[in-house]
Image (tube, rainbow, N blue to C red):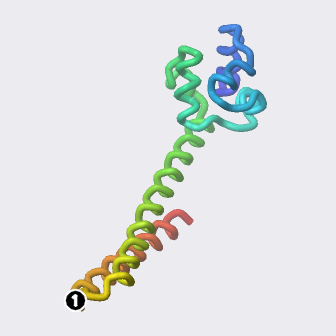
Amino acid sequence: MEVGERLKLRRVELNLTQEYVAEVLGITRQTISNWENGRSYPDIERMIRLSDVYSLSLDELLKGDKKMVKHLQENTLVNHFLKVFIIMLSINILLMIVLVTNQTISNTFIFIIFALIGMNTLTLFYLIVKKI
């Protein structure tokens, strides 16, 4: 049984409406309908909240639905990639600001900042190529 079918079955067992569940989760009724009909999947945060609302463990919700598990894994990897990418980019920007705004720094310090920017940039390119 797929996640959508489990969600619908449990919602009906508990005599809950799509409107009620949507309101509790802060989403639209159409989103609940899309999940139940397999047109889309909830993210991991909503899955956790659904497991609370429906009094089911995540294991009970996910077991057997390989597409849903794959979707959550991909979502998690993308979120991790974006966080790392943003942190690395922010470090580069911060280093460039330090380099541009500080007029009294030594040549050694300038070299260190350029080296850090270079390493960060190479890491960013690696992350991008790895993701592609």
Q: Is residue 25 above or below residue 130?
A: above
> x, y percentage for residue 87?
42, 61
**Quadrant hosting residue 28:** top right
Judging by the rendered image, the residue that carries numbered circle 1 is 106
Viewer-nearest residue: 76 or 3:
76
- Residue at image coords 72%, 28%: 32
Horizontally, residue 114 falls left or right of residue 17, namely left
Viewer-nearest residue: 108 or 82:
108
Q: Is residue 70 above or below residue 24?
A: below
Q: Quadrant of the C terminus?
A: bottom right
User: Which residue type does callout 1 highlight?
Assistant: Ser
> x, y percentage for residue 14?
66, 8
- Residue at image coords 70%, 22%: 5
Q: Secondary structure at mark 1?
A: loop
> x, y percentage for residue 98?
34, 77
**Quadrant hosting residue 27:** top right
Horizontally, residue 1 falls left or right of residue 52, namely right
Viewer-nearest residue: 66 or 87:
87
- Residue at image coords 50%, 24%: 59
**Quadrant hosting residue 72:** top right
